[in-house]
Image (cartoon, rainbow, N blue to C red):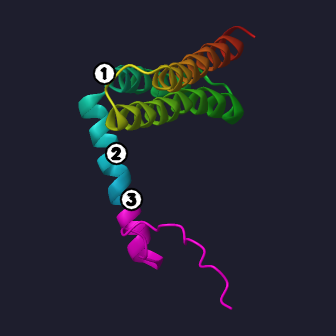
Amino acid sequence: MQAPQQDKPQESPFKGKTGLVRVINAFGYSLSGLRAAFRHEDAFRQECLLAAVLIPLALVVGDTAMERALLIGSTMLVLIVELLNSAVEATVDRVSLERHQLAKRAKDIGSAAVLLSLFNLAAMWALVLFG
């Protein structure tokens, strides 16, 4: 008697590259993602403008390497969280454009993550500048 076949998890047809080819492909996908976010996401463009001001400023106002790292890191974190939020929103919209409580929850939670990253940014800058 044979054991019942277990369903194998589906693998992406895009997987399978290894080594340097995978790294090069991943870098290209990342650049495509940055371009798409910049092109389609107003909030990401605004936060990039903020980062373009704050990152050079961090190099000037940070007295120590640790202060500069905190200022730059908190600024970069806003961009990272915004990218993840945009990915969640795009995925939710891809699944369905109709109003649904779970879709709203997913989008609201992503938005809350961005808000917390902005609070973190403000706290880091306030502590470094005035602490």
| Location of the N terminus (image quadrant) | bottom right
Marks 1 and 3, how far apart in space? 23 Å
Residue 2 sits inside the magenta stretch: yes
- The secondary element bearing badge 2 is classed as helix
> Could you tell me which secondary element the residue under label 1 belongs to?
helix
Q: Is the residue 6 above or below the residue 49 in the image?
A: below
- Left or right: residue 39 versus residue 19 is left
In percent of the image, x 32 and y 58: which residue is there? 28
> Are there few (<14), some (14-19), or many (20+) residues within 10 Å of tag 2?
some
Q: Nearer the viewer, residue 7 or 29?
A: 7
Q: Nearer the viewer, mark 1 or mark 3?
A: 1
Q: Which residue is mark 2?
A: 33
Locate residue 123, reporting x and y percent: 67, 14
Q: Residue 90 location, x and y as percent? A: 36, 34
Whether residue 54 is in magenta: the answer is no
**Which stretch is magenta?**
1-26
Dot 1 amino acid type: Asp
Give the image quarter of residue 52. top left
